Amino acid sequence: MLGAIVLGVLILVEIVFMVLSLLKKSNFKKEKHITSIILFLTFLLLVISPIINWGFQWFMLGLVLGIQALLGILFFVRKRSSSEPRKIRLIFGSISKVLLIGITVLPVLIFPQYNDIKPTGEYPVGTKSYTLTDESREEYFTEEKDSRKITIQYWYPVDQSGRKESILRGKFPLVVFSHGSFGYRMSNYSTYQELASHGYIVCSIDHTYHAFMTKQEDGKTIIANMEFMNNAMKAENGEISDEETYKLTQEWLKLRIEDMTFVLDYIKKMTTSSNADAVYQSIDLEHIGLFGHSIGGATAAQIGREDEDVDAVIVVDGTMLGEIIGFENGQDIVTDIPYPKPIMNFYNESHYNVAIESQAVYANMVASRNALNSYQVVIKGSDHLSFTDLPIISPFLSKMLDTGAVDTSVDARYCIETTNEDILQFFDHYLKSSKVEIPKERFK
Protein backbone atom coordinates (compact mmCIF):
# COMPACT_ATOMS: atom_id res chain seq x y z
CA MET A 1 0.00 0.00 0.00
CA LEU A 2 2.73 2.47 0.98
CA GLY A 3 4.72 1.58 -2.13
CA ALA A 4 1.69 2.24 -4.37
CA ILE A 5 1.17 5.65 -2.71
CA VAL A 6 4.83 6.60 -3.19
CA LEU A 7 4.71 5.47 -6.83
CA GLY A 8 1.51 7.43 -7.46
CA VAL A 9 2.86 10.64 -5.91
CA LEU A 10 6.15 10.56 -7.84
CA ILE A 11 4.46 9.82 -11.18
CA LEU A 12 1.87 12.55 -10.53
CA VAL A 13 4.64 15.09 -9.86
CA GLU A 14 6.36 14.15 -13.13
CA ILE A 15 3.11 14.34 -15.13
CA VAL A 16 2.23 17.74 -13.66
CA PHE A 17 5.61 19.18 -14.65
CA MET A 18 5.35 17.68 -18.15
CA VAL A 19 1.90 19.19 -18.72
CA LEU A 20 2.95 22.61 -17.34
CA SER A 21 6.09 22.59 -19.48
CA LEU A 22 4.07 21.86 -22.63
CA LEU A 23 1.47 24.52 -21.84
CA LYS A 24 3.87 27.24 -20.68
CA LYS A 25 6.74 26.31 -23.01
CA SER A 26 9.17 26.41 -20.12
CA ASN A 27 11.51 23.81 -18.60
CA PHE A 28 10.60 24.83 -15.03
CA LYS A 29 14.13 23.72 -14.11
CA LYS A 30 14.22 25.80 -10.95
CA GLU A 31 10.88 24.46 -9.73
CA LYS A 32 11.82 20.87 -10.63
CA HIS A 33 15.07 21.03 -8.70
CA ILE A 34 13.32 22.57 -5.68
CA THR A 35 10.77 19.75 -5.85
CA SER A 36 13.58 17.16 -6.06
CA ILE A 37 15.18 18.54 -2.91
CA ILE A 38 11.83 18.63 -1.10
CA LEU A 39 11.02 15.05 -2.13
CA PHE A 40 14.37 13.78 -0.85
CA LEU A 41 14.01 15.64 2.47
CA THR A 42 10.46 14.27 2.81
CA PHE A 43 11.79 10.76 2.13
CA LEU A 44 14.44 11.20 4.84
CA LEU A 45 11.78 12.36 7.32
CA LEU A 46 9.63 9.32 6.51
CA VAL A 47 12.63 7.03 7.03
CA ILE A 48 13.40 8.64 10.38
CA SER A 49 9.74 8.43 11.39
CA PRO A 50 7.89 5.11 12.01
CA ILE A 51 6.19 5.37 8.60
CA ILE A 52 9.04 3.83 6.54
CA ASN A 53 10.91 0.87 8.01
CA TRP A 54 14.26 1.12 6.25
CA GLY A 55 15.20 -2.02 4.35
CA PHE A 56 16.78 -3.17 1.11
CA GLN A 57 13.57 -2.47 -0.83
CA TRP A 58 13.91 1.29 -0.21
CA PHE A 59 17.58 1.55 -1.22
CA MET A 60 17.13 2.21 -4.97
CA LEU A 61 14.46 4.84 -4.40
CA GLY A 62 16.55 6.58 -1.76
CA LEU A 63 19.60 6.56 -4.03
CA VAL A 64 17.74 8.06 -7.01
CA LEU A 65 16.01 10.73 -4.90
CA GLY A 66 19.36 11.57 -3.31
CA ILE A 67 21.08 11.97 -6.70
CA GLN A 68 18.24 14.16 -7.97
CA ALA A 69 18.45 16.33 -4.85
CA LEU A 70 22.23 16.66 -5.28
CA LEU A 71 21.76 17.75 -8.90
CA GLY A 72 19.22 20.29 -7.66
CA ILE A 73 21.71 21.74 -5.20
CA LEU A 74 24.41 21.92 -7.92
CA PHE A 75 21.92 23.72 -10.18
CA PHE A 76 21.49 26.52 -7.67
CA VAL A 77 25.21 26.68 -6.86
CA ARG A 78 26.14 27.06 -10.54
CA LYS A 79 23.09 29.30 -11.26
CA ARG A 80 22.32 27.83 -14.67
CA SER A 81 19.60 29.49 -16.74
CA SER A 82 16.54 27.78 -18.20
CA SER A 83 15.91 27.39 -21.93
CA GLU A 84 12.77 26.73 -23.91
CA PRO A 85 12.10 22.97 -24.05
CA ARG A 86 11.78 20.91 -27.19
CA LYS A 87 8.44 19.11 -27.19
CA ILE A 88 9.70 15.66 -28.26
CA ARG A 89 12.65 15.81 -25.90
CA LEU A 90 10.39 16.87 -23.05
CA ILE A 91 7.92 14.01 -23.61
CA PHE A 92 10.60 11.35 -23.94
CA GLY A 93 12.41 12.73 -20.91
CA SER A 94 9.25 12.54 -18.82
CA ILE A 95 8.52 8.99 -20.00
CA SER A 96 12.08 7.99 -19.11
CA LYS A 97 11.71 9.44 -15.62
CA VAL A 98 8.40 7.64 -15.10
CA LEU A 99 10.06 4.37 -16.09
CA LEU A 100 12.94 5.11 -13.72
CA ILE A 101 10.47 5.81 -10.93
CA GLY A 102 8.73 2.51 -11.65
CA ILE A 103 12.00 0.59 -11.50
CA THR A 104 13.11 2.21 -8.23
CA VAL A 105 9.75 1.64 -6.52
CA LEU A 106 9.37 -1.92 -7.86
CA PRO A 107 11.25 -3.57 -4.93
CA VAL A 108 8.87 -1.80 -2.51
CA LEU A 109 5.88 -3.14 -4.44
CA ILE A 110 7.27 -6.70 -4.55
CA PHE A 111 8.50 -6.68 -0.93
CA PRO A 112 6.19 -4.30 0.95
CA GLN A 113 7.14 -3.49 4.50
CA TYR A 114 5.33 -5.50 7.17
CA ASN A 115 5.26 -6.00 10.91
CA ASP A 116 7.31 -8.98 12.06
CA ILE A 117 5.53 -11.93 13.61
CA LYS A 118 6.70 -11.83 17.20
CA PRO A 119 7.41 -15.14 18.95
CA THR A 120 5.12 -15.75 21.92
CA GLY A 121 7.51 -17.77 24.09
CA GLU A 122 9.44 -16.63 27.13
CA TYR A 123 12.95 -17.08 25.69
CA PRO A 124 14.94 -14.76 23.43
CA VAL A 125 16.14 -16.56 20.29
CA GLY A 126 19.63 -16.95 18.84
CA THR A 127 20.74 -18.47 15.57
CA LYS A 128 23.85 -20.01 14.00
CA SER A 129 24.64 -21.60 10.62
CA TYR A 130 26.96 -24.37 9.49
CA THR A 131 27.92 -25.82 6.13
CA LEU A 132 28.50 -29.57 6.34
CA THR A 133 30.23 -31.83 3.81
CA ASP A 134 28.97 -35.36 3.20
CA GLU A 135 32.11 -37.13 2.04
CA SER A 136 30.13 -40.29 1.26
CA ARG A 137 28.12 -38.65 -1.52
CA GLU A 138 29.23 -37.06 -4.76
CA GLU A 139 27.51 -33.86 -5.87
CA TYR A 140 25.91 -34.73 -9.19
CA PHE A 141 24.58 -31.21 -9.84
CA THR A 142 28.09 -29.95 -10.62
CA GLU A 143 30.31 -30.83 -13.54
CA GLU A 144 33.47 -30.90 -11.43
CA LYS A 145 33.92 -33.70 -8.93
CA ASP A 146 32.86 -32.59 -5.48
CA SER A 147 31.30 -33.97 -2.31
CA ARG A 148 27.77 -32.85 -1.46
CA LYS A 149 27.58 -29.86 0.89
CA ILE A 150 24.55 -29.14 3.06
CA THR A 151 24.00 -25.84 4.88
CA ILE A 152 21.92 -25.88 8.05
CA GLN A 153 20.81 -23.17 10.44
CA TYR A 154 19.81 -23.47 14.09
CA TRP A 155 17.45 -21.38 16.18
CA TYR A 156 17.61 -21.87 19.94
CA PRO A 157 16.70 -20.21 23.26
CA VAL A 158 19.41 -17.90 24.59
CA ASP A 159 20.47 -16.41 27.90
CA GLN A 160 20.96 -12.65 27.68
CA SER A 161 21.72 -12.09 31.36
CA GLY A 162 25.49 -12.03 30.90
CA ARG A 163 27.74 -9.75 28.88
CA LYS A 164 27.73 -12.16 25.98
CA GLU A 165 24.61 -13.82 24.57
CA SER A 166 24.83 -17.61 24.90
CA ILE A 167 22.56 -20.58 24.47
CA LEU A 168 20.36 -21.17 27.49
CA ARG A 169 21.69 -23.90 29.77
CA GLY A 170 19.75 -27.13 29.73
CA LYS A 171 18.51 -29.78 27.30
CA PHE A 172 15.92 -28.97 24.65
CA PRO A 173 13.96 -31.10 22.16
CA LEU A 174 15.26 -31.09 18.59
CA VAL A 175 13.01 -30.23 15.65
CA VAL A 176 14.33 -30.51 12.06
CA PHE A 177 12.71 -28.76 9.07
CA SER A 178 12.86 -29.46 5.32
CA HIS A 179 11.70 -26.77 2.85
CA GLY A 180 9.56 -27.18 -0.27
CA SER A 181 10.57 -27.22 -3.93
CA PHE A 182 10.85 -23.44 -4.35
CA GLY A 183 11.78 -22.67 -0.77
CA TYR A 184 14.97 -22.42 1.25
CA ARG A 185 15.97 -22.75 4.86
CA MET A 186 14.37 -19.40 5.85
CA SER A 187 10.96 -20.30 4.36
CA ASN A 188 9.31 -20.64 7.78
CA TYR A 189 11.44 -18.26 9.82
CA SER A 190 8.49 -17.25 12.02
CA THR A 191 7.84 -20.91 12.86
CA TYR A 192 11.45 -21.50 13.93
CA GLN A 193 11.36 -18.36 16.08
CA GLU A 194 8.12 -19.45 17.71
CA LEU A 195 9.39 -22.93 18.54
CA ALA A 196 12.78 -21.73 19.80
CA SER A 197 11.15 -19.12 22.03
CA HIS A 198 9.24 -21.96 23.71
CA GLY A 199 12.33 -24.04 24.40
CA TYR A 200 13.12 -26.00 21.23
CA ILE A 201 16.26 -26.24 19.15
CA VAL A 202 15.22 -25.94 15.52
CA CYS A 203 17.44 -27.04 12.63
CA SER A 204 16.44 -25.98 9.11
CA ILE A 205 18.11 -27.59 6.10
CA ASP A 206 19.01 -26.05 2.75
CA HIS A 207 18.73 -28.85 0.18
CA THR A 208 21.48 -27.52 -2.08
CA TYR A 209 20.40 -27.06 -5.74
CA HIS A 210 16.80 -27.79 -4.69
CA ALA A 211 16.71 -24.66 -2.53
CA PHE A 212 15.87 -21.40 -4.28
CA MET A 213 19.10 -20.03 -2.83
CA THR A 214 21.77 -21.44 -0.54
CA LYS A 215 24.24 -19.14 1.23
CA GLN A 216 27.15 -21.29 2.44
CA GLU A 217 29.34 -20.36 5.37
CA ASP A 218 32.30 -19.74 3.03
CA GLY A 219 30.25 -16.94 1.44
CA LYS A 220 29.39 -18.83 -1.74
CA THR A 221 25.81 -18.47 -2.96
CA ILE A 222 24.24 -21.36 -4.90
CA ILE A 223 21.05 -20.92 -6.91
CA ALA A 224 18.57 -23.74 -7.57
CA ASN A 225 19.32 -26.08 -10.46
CA MET A 226 17.26 -24.89 -13.44
CA GLU A 227 16.49 -28.39 -14.70
CA PHE A 228 15.03 -29.27 -11.32
CA MET A 229 13.02 -26.03 -11.21
CA ASN A 230 11.65 -26.57 -14.72
CA ASN A 231 10.70 -30.19 -14.06
CA ALA A 232 9.07 -29.25 -10.77
CA MET A 233 6.96 -26.61 -12.54
CA LYS A 234 6.00 -29.06 -15.28
CA ALA A 235 5.01 -31.69 -12.73
CA GLU A 236 2.98 -29.13 -10.77
CA ASN A 237 1.18 -27.94 -13.92
CA GLY A 238 0.48 -31.45 -15.21
CA GLU A 239 2.70 -31.02 -18.28
CA ILE A 240 4.35 -34.43 -17.88
CA SER A 241 2.81 -37.87 -17.49
CA ASP A 242 1.83 -39.31 -14.12
CA GLU A 243 4.41 -42.06 -14.50
CA GLU A 244 7.21 -39.62 -15.26
CA THR A 245 6.07 -37.45 -12.35
CA TYR A 246 6.26 -40.49 -10.07
CA LYS A 247 9.83 -41.26 -11.21
CA LEU A 248 10.98 -37.65 -10.78
CA THR A 249 9.41 -37.13 -7.36
CA GLN A 250 10.89 -40.38 -6.07
CA GLU A 251 14.31 -39.23 -7.29
CA TRP A 252 13.92 -35.85 -5.59
CA LEU A 253 12.66 -37.48 -2.42
CA LYS A 254 15.64 -39.83 -2.32
CA LEU A 255 18.07 -36.90 -2.45
CA ARG A 256 16.28 -35.07 0.34
CA ILE A 257 16.03 -38.16 2.53
CA GLU A 258 19.77 -38.63 2.17
CA ASP A 259 20.31 -34.96 3.10
CA MET A 260 18.15 -35.10 6.21
CA THR A 261 19.52 -38.50 7.26
CA PHE A 262 23.06 -37.13 6.97
CA VAL A 263 22.13 -34.07 9.07
CA LEU A 264 20.47 -36.19 11.75
CA ASP A 265 23.43 -38.55 11.90
CA TYR A 266 25.80 -35.59 12.16
CA ILE A 267 23.76 -34.07 15.00
CA LYS A 268 23.70 -37.38 16.86
CA LYS A 269 27.46 -37.67 16.50
CA MET A 270 28.14 -34.10 17.61
CA THR A 271 25.99 -34.32 20.72
CA THR A 272 28.42 -36.90 22.11
CA SER A 273 31.52 -34.85 21.26
CA SER A 274 33.14 -32.85 24.05
CA ASN A 275 34.49 -30.36 21.47
CA ALA A 276 31.12 -29.64 19.86
CA ASP A 277 29.55 -26.18 19.90
CA ALA A 278 27.14 -25.40 22.72
CA VAL A 279 24.09 -25.83 20.50
CA TYR A 280 24.87 -29.54 20.06
CA GLN A 281 25.52 -30.05 23.74
CA SER A 282 22.05 -28.64 24.48
CA ILE A 283 20.12 -31.03 22.21
CA ASP A 284 17.92 -33.65 23.85
CA LEU A 285 18.10 -36.66 21.51
CA GLU A 286 15.36 -38.40 23.51
CA HIS A 287 12.83 -36.01 21.97
CA ILE A 288 13.08 -35.44 18.21
CA GLY A 289 10.44 -34.05 15.86
CA LEU A 290 10.51 -33.58 12.10
CA PHE A 291 8.46 -31.31 9.88
CA GLY A 292 8.55 -29.89 6.41
CA HIS A 293 6.60 -28.03 3.76
CA SER A 294 5.46 -29.69 0.51
CA ILE A 295 8.08 -32.25 -0.58
CA GLY A 296 9.94 -31.32 2.60
CA GLY A 297 6.96 -32.72 4.49
CA ALA A 298 7.23 -35.93 2.46
CA THR A 299 10.90 -36.10 3.45
CA ALA A 300 10.10 -35.67 7.14
CA ALA A 301 7.35 -38.30 6.94
CA GLN A 302 9.53 -40.94 5.33
CA ILE A 303 12.39 -40.49 7.78
CA GLY A 304 9.84 -40.53 10.58
CA ARG A 305 8.76 -43.94 9.34
CA GLU A 306 12.33 -45.27 9.13
CA ASP A 307 14.17 -43.65 12.07
CA GLU A 308 13.26 -45.07 15.47
CA ASP A 309 14.68 -42.00 17.21
CA VAL A 310 12.02 -39.72 15.70
CA ASP A 311 9.02 -39.20 18.00
CA ALA A 312 6.58 -37.06 15.97
CA VAL A 313 6.13 -35.76 12.40
CA ILE A 314 4.29 -32.86 10.76
CA VAL A 315 3.58 -32.68 7.02
CA VAL A 316 2.77 -29.10 6.04
CA ASP A 317 0.64 -29.24 2.88
CA GLY A 318 2.65 -31.96 1.19
CA THR A 319 1.93 -35.34 -0.37
CA MET A 320 3.55 -38.23 1.52
CA LEU A 321 5.49 -39.48 -1.49
CA GLY A 322 7.38 -42.08 0.51
CA GLU A 323 4.11 -43.94 1.11
CA ILE A 324 3.85 -44.51 -2.65
CA ILE A 325 5.78 -47.71 -3.34
CA GLY A 326 5.00 -48.18 -7.02
CA PHE A 327 3.09 -47.05 -10.10
CA GLU A 328 1.01 -49.47 -12.15
CA ASN A 329 -1.81 -49.10 -14.66
CA GLY A 330 -1.80 -45.33 -14.27
CA GLN A 331 -2.26 -45.50 -10.49
CA ASP A 332 -0.06 -44.96 -7.46
CA ILE A 333 0.43 -48.02 -5.27
CA VAL A 334 0.31 -46.96 -1.60
CA THR A 335 1.74 -49.06 1.21
CA ASP A 336 -0.68 -50.49 3.76
CA ILE A 337 1.99 -50.86 6.44
CA PRO A 338 0.79 -48.81 9.46
CA TYR A 339 2.54 -45.49 9.97
CA PRO A 340 4.42 -45.93 13.26
CA LYS A 341 4.55 -42.34 14.60
CA PRO A 342 2.10 -39.60 15.60
CA ILE A 343 1.61 -37.46 12.49
CA MET A 344 -0.15 -34.18 11.74
CA ASN A 345 -1.12 -33.15 8.20
CA PHE A 346 -1.84 -29.55 7.21
CA TYR A 347 -3.92 -29.01 4.06
CA ASN A 348 -4.83 -26.00 2.01
CA GLU A 349 -8.52 -26.07 1.15
CA SER A 350 -8.08 -27.20 -2.46
CA HIS A 351 -5.58 -29.89 -1.50
CA TYR A 352 -7.93 -31.25 1.15
CA ASN A 353 -10.87 -31.43 -1.26
CA VAL A 354 -8.77 -33.43 -3.74
CA ALA A 355 -7.52 -35.68 -0.94
CA ILE A 356 -11.08 -36.41 0.21
CA GLU A 357 -12.21 -37.25 -3.32
CA SER A 358 -9.47 -39.89 -3.62
CA GLN A 359 -9.10 -40.80 0.04
CA ALA A 360 -9.17 -44.54 -0.63
CA VAL A 361 -5.87 -44.33 -2.53
CA TYR A 362 -4.37 -40.94 -1.58
CA ALA A 363 -1.11 -41.48 0.32
CA ASN A 364 -1.78 -39.02 3.17
CA MET A 365 -5.28 -40.32 3.82
CA VAL A 366 -4.19 -43.97 3.74
CA ALA A 367 -1.27 -43.24 6.08
CA SER A 368 -3.51 -41.26 8.46
CA ARG A 369 -6.01 -44.11 8.70
CA ASN A 370 -3.20 -46.55 9.51
CA ALA A 371 -1.13 -44.25 11.75
CA LEU A 372 -0.41 -44.66 15.44
CA ASN A 373 -2.06 -41.27 15.98
CA SER A 374 -3.04 -38.88 13.19
CA TYR A 375 -4.33 -35.33 13.06
CA GLN A 376 -5.55 -33.10 10.23
CA VAL A 377 -5.68 -29.32 10.03
CA VAL A 378 -7.45 -27.57 7.14
CA ILE A 379 -7.28 -23.79 6.81
CA LYS A 380 -10.09 -22.46 4.65
CA GLY A 381 -9.16 -20.12 1.83
CA SER A 382 -5.48 -21.03 2.05
CA ASP A 383 -3.17 -22.08 -0.75
CA HIS A 384 0.10 -23.98 -0.86
CA LEU A 385 2.40 -21.11 0.12
CA SER A 386 0.07 -19.77 2.82
CA PHE A 387 1.87 -22.08 5.26
CA THR A 388 5.17 -20.23 4.75
CA ASP A 389 6.23 -16.65 5.50
CA LEU A 390 6.28 -15.69 1.80
CA PRO A 391 2.72 -14.25 1.59
CA ILE A 392 3.68 -11.76 4.31
CA ILE A 393 7.13 -10.97 2.95
CA SER A 394 5.99 -10.72 -0.68
CA PRO A 395 2.28 -11.14 -1.53
CA PHE A 396 3.19 -10.57 -5.20
CA LEU A 397 5.68 -13.45 -5.38
CA SER A 398 3.38 -15.69 -3.37
CA LYS A 399 0.51 -15.23 -5.84
CA MET A 400 2.83 -15.60 -8.82
CA LEU A 401 4.40 -18.85 -7.60
CA ASP A 402 1.37 -20.51 -6.06
CA THR A 403 -0.80 -22.89 -8.06
CA GLY A 404 -2.98 -24.01 -5.17
CA ALA A 405 -6.45 -22.88 -4.18
CA VAL A 406 -8.54 -20.93 -6.68
CA ASP A 407 -9.83 -18.55 -4.01
CA THR A 408 -7.00 -17.52 -1.70
CA SER A 409 -9.10 -15.54 0.74
CA VAL A 410 -7.33 -16.32 4.01
CA ASP A 411 -5.46 -13.53 5.77
CA ALA A 412 -1.75 -14.32 5.41
CA ARG A 413 -0.85 -13.37 8.98
CA TYR A 414 -3.75 -15.37 10.44
CA CYS A 415 -2.77 -18.44 8.42
CA ILE A 416 0.90 -18.58 9.41
CA GLU A 417 0.19 -17.66 13.04
CA THR A 418 -2.45 -20.40 13.21
CA THR A 419 -0.03 -22.85 11.60
CA ASN A 420 2.71 -21.94 14.08
CA GLU A 421 0.32 -22.30 17.01
CA ASP A 422 -0.82 -25.77 15.92
CA ILE A 423 2.73 -26.94 15.21
CA LEU A 424 3.83 -25.81 18.67
CA GLN A 425 0.86 -27.49 20.32
CA PHE A 426 1.53 -30.79 18.52
CA PHE A 427 5.23 -30.88 19.38
CA ASP A 428 4.50 -29.80 22.97
CA HIS A 429 2.16 -32.77 23.26
CA TYR A 430 4.55 -35.38 21.90
CA LEU A 431 7.98 -33.97 22.73
CA LYS A 432 7.23 -32.27 26.05
CA SER A 433 4.32 -34.40 27.32
CA SER A 434 1.88 -31.49 27.35
CA LYS A 435 -1.56 -32.46 28.62
CA VAL A 436 -3.40 -30.24 26.13
CA GLU A 437 -5.71 -32.38 24.03
CA ILE A 438 -5.37 -32.07 20.26
CA PRO A 439 -8.51 -32.49 18.12
CA LYS A 440 -8.16 -35.17 15.43
CA GLU A 441 -9.55 -32.81 12.78
CA ARG A 442 -9.61 -29.05 12.70
CA PHE A 443 -11.16 -26.80 10.07
CA LYS A 444 -10.15 -23.17 10.50
Image (cartoon, rainbow, N blue to C red):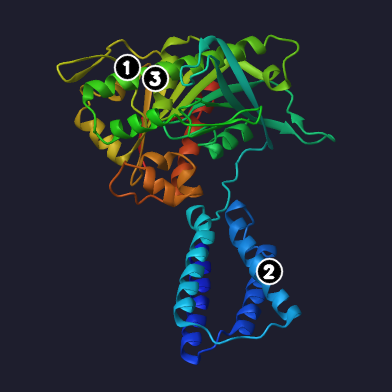
What amino acid is found at the position of numbered circle 1 in the picture?
Glu
**In-front residue for pair 444/288:** 288
| Residue at mark 2 to residue at mark 3: CA–CA distance | 51 Å
**In-front residue for pair 59/351:** 59
- Residue 112: which numbered mark, if any? none
Query: Mark 3: which secondary structure?
Result: helix
Residue located beneath label 2 in the image:
45
Residue 196 visible to the viewer: yes
Residue 94's spot in the image, x, y percent?
Answer: 49, 74
Q: Nearer the viewer, mark 2 or mark 1?
A: 2
Q: In the picture, residue 314 is in which quadrant?
A: top left
| Residue at mark 1 to residue at mark 3: CA–CA distance | 11 Å
Residue located beneath label 3 in the image:
253
Query: Mark 1: which secondary structure?
Result: helix
Q: Which quarter of the image is occupied by the C terminus? A: top left
**In-front residue for pair 208/73:** 73
Q: Please name the residue shown 63% across and 35% down the image.
A: 197
Decide which of tag 2 and tag 1 comes sooner along the chain: 2
Residue located beneath label 1 in the image:
323
